[in-house]
Image (tube, rainbow, N blue to C red):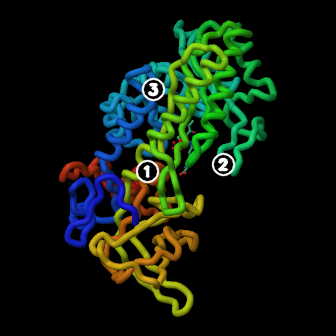
């Protein structure tokens, strides 16, 4: 198992943020999410540094969908980041955490009228307008309020970063954004001429998630900067901000070979410099929206091992006290994870493979298939690493299993930031 951030081994035991993980499991019980605060802050600082946030006034907007308790809003505000929200619920979280509303980008392909109204009333900085329906509602709400709202248009740039060699088809077949190829984008620009209460200041695109190469982003720079030039020349619209979305990949298992934050940022910035010169435009403010790469490796989950079922010549199932309710990614995406026994960190790996199963009534509730760990016994504490992104945020109450608490560790201290859901709270919506 790869040790991330401040993870270290002392006396055969795993420590995170200087805190003994066995003690954490005892204090808060399991399953438990543990976050390495120093690693998240360091990631924020790397992005700020290499994406030239101070130097060039660029912006890093954390994609809150990855993991957004109120404490994360406070943390990223302290680190000088902006925030990307995609729903009334995420917006409300930021509001309750006193996050500056002007530093919010409001995304979403089907914002409801209530959500749009909420965003306008709270004064979010930018609406990333996805479609004609939203554009019309926003204009009329802002007209009623006699105000002007800054917006970006979400562009479907036709770059699919998930195919081996990213391709330029499929532009039209996406539920997100205005396509360039079928003319939708330009129709939206035309519609702006009639509108007085929305102001197009930027363009946005998002090309995928868990991307390991810089090339698709370079391609995105090409498309987006050509568009900046065209909007100036053909429509006399000055695009001041260009947002490249998120998607930077991270390490989950040995087969993942991500580039560093530095390499991604430098690659994108270099391409932007080159492209500006080539087509002779002024450099706009650049925005990135990382979610996963800020928090994934900083989060881990501690479980207690319960039943161990050996089916001779077939498989050994090692069951833990959580599973798909706190980490849906293995069942949903066949995502791979690494694990270890935190109270036996120096044990050699065994050739005997085991399968780590969750506790849900679902055969697909398997966290890790065929992993080798030595000497597992019931009551040992198992850790799965890199669960910080899309773990807590995609957690469910399937089988009426309560949600895990979240603890932040830093410099020898632990701080509970989300408590464990109680059975009472589980029923709190039921009348
Ligand atoms: N910006 C936009 C507009 C997005 O749609 C997303 C992610 C991001 C930024 C952040 O992307 P990231 O840096 O986290 O890759 N549930 C899936 C991931 C879905 C991502 C959706 N959009 C998973 O667990 O892998």
Circle 2 Cα neighbour tier, 10 Å, few/some/many (<14 / 14–19 / ≥20): some
Sequence-wise, which precedes: disc 3 or disc 2? 3
For numbered disc 1, what is the local secondary structure? helix
Which image quarter has ligand 1? top right
- Which image quarter is the N terminus in? bottom left
Residue placed most toward the observer, 116 or 156: 156
Residue placed most toward the observer, 220 or 358: 220
The residue positioned 44% from the left and 39% from the top of the image is 262
The residue positioned 55% from the left and 61% from the top of the image is 335
Q: Which residue is mark 3?
A: 59
Residue 424 visible (yes or no) = no
Mark carried by residue 162:
2
Gap between marks 2 and 1 measured at Cα: 19 Å
Circle 1 Cα neighbour tier, 10 Å, few/some/many (<14 / 14–19 / ≥20): many
Sequence-wise, which precedes: disc 1 or disc 3? 3
Mark carried by residue 296:
1
Tell me whether circle 3 and circle 2 mark residues in contact (CB < 8 Å): no
Tell me whether circle 1 and circle 3 mark residues in contact (CB < 8 Å): no
- The CB of the residue at mark 2 lies under 8 Å from ligand 1: no
248 relative position to 11: left or right: right
Mark carried by residue 10:
none
């Amino acid at each position: 198992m790869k040790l991330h951030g401040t993870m270290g081994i002392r006396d055969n035991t795993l420590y995170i943020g200087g805190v003994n993980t066995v003690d954490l499991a005892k204090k808060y019980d399991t399953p438990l999410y543990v976050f390495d605060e120093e690693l998240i802050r360091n990631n924020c600082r790397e992005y700020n540094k290499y994406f030239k946030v101070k130097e060039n006034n660029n912006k890093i907007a954390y994609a809150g969908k990855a993991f957004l308790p109120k404490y994360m809003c406070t943390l990223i505000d302290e680190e000088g980041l902006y925030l990307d929200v995609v729903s009334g619920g995420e917006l409300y979280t930021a509001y309750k955490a006193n996050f500056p509303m002007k530093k919010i980008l409001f995304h979403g392909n089907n914002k409801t009228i209530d959500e749009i109204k909420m965003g306008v009333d709270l004064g979010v900085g930018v609406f990333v307008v996805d479609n004609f329906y939203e554009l019309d509602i926003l204009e009329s709400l802002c007209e009623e309020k006699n105000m002007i709202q800054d917006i970006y248009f979400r562009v479907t740039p036709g770059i699919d970063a998930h195919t081996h060699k990213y391709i330029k088809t499929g532009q039209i077949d996406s539920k997100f954004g205005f396509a360039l190829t079928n003319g939708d984008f330009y129709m939206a620009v035309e519609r702006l001429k009639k509108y007085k209460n929305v102001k197009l200041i930027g363009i946005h695109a998002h090309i995928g998630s868990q991307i390991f190469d810089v090339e698709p982003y370079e391609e995105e720079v090409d498309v987006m900067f050509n568009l900046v030039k065209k909007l100036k020349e053909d429509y006399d619209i000055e695009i001041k901000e260009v947002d490249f979305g998120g998607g930077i990949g991270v390490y989950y298992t040995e087969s993942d070979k991500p580039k560093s934050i530095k390499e991604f940022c430098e690659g994108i910035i270099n391409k932007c410099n080159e492209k500006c010169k080539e087509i002779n435009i002024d450099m706009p403010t650049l925005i990135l929206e990382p979610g996963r790469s800020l928090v994934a490796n900083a989060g881990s989950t501690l479980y207690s091992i319960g039943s161990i079922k050996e089916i001779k010549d077939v498989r050994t199932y090692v069951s833990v006290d959580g599973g798909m309710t706190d980490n849906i990614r293995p069942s949903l995406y066949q995502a791979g994870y690494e694990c270890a026994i935190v109270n036996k960190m120096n044990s050699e790996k065994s050739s005997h493979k085991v399968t780590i199963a969750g506790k849900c009534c679902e055969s697909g509730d398997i966290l890790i298939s065929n992993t080798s760990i030595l000497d597992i016994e019931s009551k040992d504490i198992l850790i799965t690493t890199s669960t910080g992104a899309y773990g807590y945020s995609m957690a469910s109450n399937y089988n009426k299993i309560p949600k895990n608490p979240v603890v932040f560790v830093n410099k020898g201290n632990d701080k509970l930031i989300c408590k464990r859901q109680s059975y009472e709270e589980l029923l709190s919506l039921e009348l």
